[in-house]
Image (cartoon, rainbow, N blue to C red):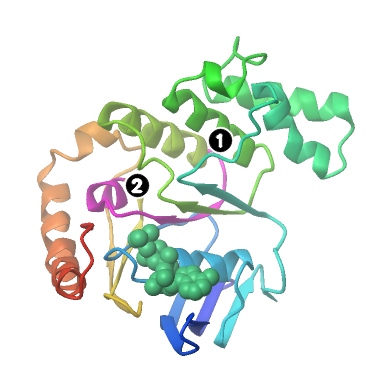
Amino acid sequence: MSYLVDIDHATKRFLTSAGTAHTAVQDITLQVTAGEFVAVVGPTGCGKSTTLSLVSGLEPPSEGSVRVNGQPVRGIPSGVGYMFQADAMLPWRTVLANVASGPLWQGKPKEQADALARDWVARVGLAGFEDYYMHQLSGGMRKRVALAQTLVNEPSILLMDEPFSALDVQTRALMQNELLDLWSGTSAAVIFVTHDLEEAITLADRVVVMTASPARIKDTFEVHLERPRNVEEIRMTPEFIAIYREVWSSLSDEVAIARKTGASRVA
Ligand SMILES: Nc1ncnc2c1ncn2[C@@H]1O[C@H](COP(=O)(O)OP(=O)(O)OP(=O)(O)O)[C@@H](O)[C@H]1O
């Protein structure tokens, strides 16, 4: 089996301001294949984002290894796309120019980059808004631009760190449906970090539960809900509720530990 992402017994320690070592991620082994959607949940501050940073090359592991596309990660690997909670668009550029910036940076001629961007702007439902600036868009529309900006580069691995957490409930559901729809037309592997267990189960093929800090993998649950999924409808099915109960029974212990040790945000 060839893995697009292969995290093998990876540990990450950071140096604290007091000069001591803080273990953020401990002995994590996680493999993801093409076309697989993996959600990672865990209590706040446990080390979920750090795990993504190991894959994106932003942080090297202190121990163990991380491979992307079979190659050890050194620097930022090609074929990896990111989407974070905060948008990465430039406010002085139009929607089209923001989406075209990736292909341009990859060396595509301007005409081709613009054509690709126009296509993706339409695919995310923003045809007609190509010349708008970010301040002229709603939060949901900005997320659509962010999706187009990421997917226009045709990443084989998509790293998503709470990308929809700032959105209201309805817009979030819209964007989740949009993501599933766009992703289903690709063979990209997705690692999606979220605090929202409902979101994790709705989207993923596999939900990975992390322990309270330092993050270790506690449990992994397969989600055998049929695709295509409608995120609002699927949540009311008995199958969804059953798996939610199962995952929550694992996650809730870790949330309790994290709360005891001072974290106030809930998973
Ligand atoms: N560059 C860094 N230098 C020092 N410590 C760091 C660094 N990055 C993360 N940490 C620490 O590692 C731990 C895990 O942080 P991380 O952001 O991975 O958690 P998280 O689970 O993503 O948090 P949240 O759920 O709140 O988004 C935290 O204690 C954090 O302070």
Q: Tell me the residue at 62%/67% (across/down).
A: 58
Check residue 203 in the rendering and tell me which mark sits there, or answer none.
2
Q: Is residue 166 visible?
A: yes
Check residue 222 in the rendering and tell me which mark sits there, or answer none.
none
Q: Can residue 40 be seen in this view?
A: no
- Which one is in front, 176 or 188? 176
The amino acid type found where label 2 is placed reads Leu
From the top left corner, tell me how far across and down residue 30 is, in percent. Answer: 45, 74
* Residue 191 lies in the magenta-colored region: yes
Q: In which quarter of the image is the N terminus?
A: bottom right
Query: Farthest residue in the top direction?
Result: 128
Instruction: Determine whether the beta carbon of the residue marked 1 sits less than 8 angstroms from the nearest atom of ligand 1.
Output: no
Q: Nearer the viewer, mark 1 or mark 2?
A: 1
Q: Tell me the residue at 72%/58% (across/down).
A: 78
The amino acid type found where label 1 is placed reads Ala
Q: Quadrant of the C terminus?
A: bottom left
Q: For mark 1, what is the residue?
A: 146
Q: Tag 2, which secondary structure?
A: helix
Magenta residues (range): 185-202
Ligand 1, by image quadrant, is bottom left
Taking 180 as reference, is 249 left or right? left
From the top left corner, tell me how far across and down residue 5 is, in percent. Answer: 56, 68
Q: Tag 1, which secondary structure?
A: helix
From the top left corner, tell me how far across and down residue 105 is, in percent. Answer: 81, 43
* Residue 241 lies in the magenta-colored region: no
